[in-house]
Amino acid sequence: MKQRATKKQGGAGFTREEERAFAAFYENTRRLAFAVAFSVTCNARDAEEITQDSYVALWEKYSEALRFAFQYGRKHEKELKNLLAKIAKNKALNLIKKRRREQSVDFTSYEPPGLAYSVDERVEDGAALAAAAASLTQTEREIVLMKNAGAKMREIAGTLGIPRGTASWKYTKALEKLRRELEGTT
């Protein structure tokens, strides 16, 4: 007799087929989760850790939703993607809040960006792109990163809780801002 996981056990009782489905889901959505986390933290290491933590949370806390989606196929994958994106965003926001509470500023080692490098070196190092990205609002940055990660505009709109037309408009405006900022840098 096969034993199913209890709520407390989380994903521990998944069958091999469910584990394979979860691995496939991970491969299909890891860039999206990373993009959401990175759009909030602007730090690749933090985003990678948040991405992994998001999948662990999905596995442990939403095992029944995963089973349901895996059993009934692709039509429920959209809901799982949105859930994953929300988990990643909340974990990233929690990390930012935690760091703000713990933050101590060392003004002796602070060097304003761009003063120590020439324009060519800044472009090579990505500083120009980082400065251009800093001109975007939080929502614009999230949209651009999720779109770059391969998310469709309707998925982005669903994740952010905004109309699809608004998401498309903000994406276009964000790209224009980035272009203007980068042209001004060179």
Image: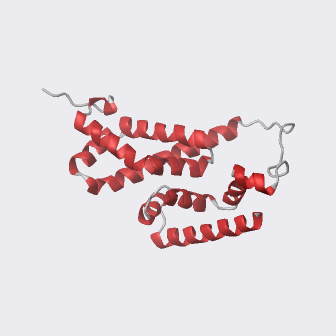
Quarter of the figure that contains the C terminus: bottom right
Q: Is residue 108 above or below residue 121?
A: above
At a point 50% along the width and 60% down the height, the residue shown is: 147
| Res 83 seen here | yes
Left or right side of 61 for 53: right
The single residue placed furthest to the left in the displayed view is 1
Quarter of the picture holding the N terminus:
top left
Residue 64 visible within the image = no
- From the top left corner, tell me how far across and down residue 47 is, in percent: 55, 43
Residue at position x 48%, y 73% in the image: 165
Q: In which image quadrant can residue 55 be found?
A: top left
Left or right: 107, with 144 as reference point: right
Please name the residue shown 66% across and 68% down the image.
179
Q: Residue furthest right?
A: 108
Seen from the viewer's position, the closer of residues 76 and 109 is 109
Tell me if residue 79 comes above or below residue 104 in the rendering.
below
Which one is nearer the viewer's eye here, 175 or 40? 175
Q: Position of residue 49 (x, y in %)?
A: 53, 37
Residue 102 picture location, percent across and down: 70, 35
Residue drawn at point x = 29 percent, y = 54 percent: 76
Judge from the rendering whether residue 64 lies leftward or rightward of residue 129; answer left or right.
Answer: left
Task: Say how the picture is coloured.
Answer: secondary structure
Left/right of residue 48 with respect to residue 12 in the rendered view = right
Classify residue 108 by image quadrant: top right
Q: Is residue 111 above or below residue 153?
A: above
Residue 17 rendering spot, x and y as whole percentages = 23, 38
